[in-house]
Image (spheres, rainbow, N blue to C red):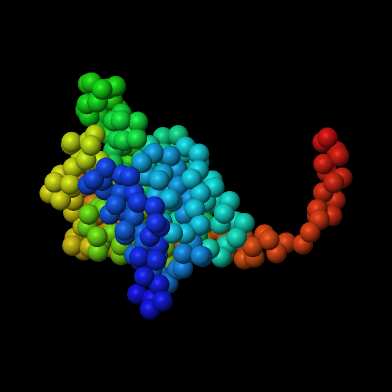
Amino acid sequence: MSTEIRFTDFKADTQPTWCPGCGDFGTMNGMMKALAETGNHPDETFIVAGIGCSGKIGSYMHAYALHGVHGRALPVGTGVKLANPDPEVMVAGGDGDGFSIGAGHFVHAVRRNLDMTYIVMDNRIYGLTKGQASPTSRADFETATTPEGPQQPPVNPLALALAAGGTFIAQTFATDAKRHAEIVQAAIEHDGFGFVNVFSPCVTFNDVDTYEYFRGNLVDVADADHDPTDYDAATSVIMDREQEYQGILWQDEQSVSYHTQHGVTDPMIDVGAGAPEGAMDLVREFY
């Protein structure tokens, strides 16, 4: 760990109002530890959050932060990183925010491969609106609005990321503190878009996908001799419908970030004043 930065430096004075036992506590702690381990400073870190319980996270972390519009956290994060490539940009959201209304933005953020990190707190339910089925809920998951279950197969966000050309795809469990922090750190250090789906149990509205369930059913790919750089092996694990996994599932060692590919190296604040030559003629042509 950096001798100058501790994970507690990323803690804000605002106390979280999440339900006691919420998985988002562990998710946030791992994010802060990973940021500290990679030597990032709160003054050089930008947190973008979506809507939902997870959307509060920007208020609970000491860094630059923006609480975005539902499903639009990734476009905001993209804009921040393009406007100024220097800060460490970390986008955080939930499964509803990212894989329902924000699904289109998710796909394009993955394929652009900007050098940023996306942490999704996947509790398989809409918690803030009091317990509706989310895109990752089981087909038979009963709620007040889906008494017989949504009767639709859950979205596989890992497969969605792989199909979109993802270069870093991982999954963690919020309460496995050491492993979670290690994987988030690897996502930050990855040259490109680091996607980490975090199983973050909702203790209030989801009595199926619980801490006990994940402790008893998750398999860590690190214990299964999985090679995350083997695309075929990664595909096999990601598409496995019978088993749930934790770890780095796929990492493209040849990944080149959007910034490197397109020469985006300077903050836009350094761009010279005034419109580019010929820009006003173009505006008048379509005015």
The answer to whether residue 213 is left or right of residue 69 is left
Q: Residue at x 77, y 62 (%)?
A: 272
Q: How many marks?
A: 0
Residue 266 is situated, as x and y percent measured from the top left of the image, at 64, 65
Describe residue 27's horizontal placement relative to residue 256 as left or right: left
Judge from the rendering whether residue 238 lies leftward or rightward of residue 118; answer left or right: left
Q: Position of residue 12 (x, y in %)?
A: 40, 57
Residue 162 appears in the picture as rendered? no
At x 47%, y 37%, the residue is 70
Q: Nearer the viewer, residue 38 or 4?
A: 4
Q: Please state, as top left, top right, bottom left or bottom right, where the C terminus lies in the image.
A: top right
Location of residue 158 in the rendering, given as x and y in whole percent from the top left corner: 34, 47
Q: Could you tell me which residue is drawn at 50 percent across and 39 percent down?
A: 69
With respect to residue 244, does 187 lie above or below? below
> Residue 179: horizontal and vertical position, in percent?
25, 62
Please name whichever residue, 275 or 105, is drawn nearer the observer in this view of the structure: 275
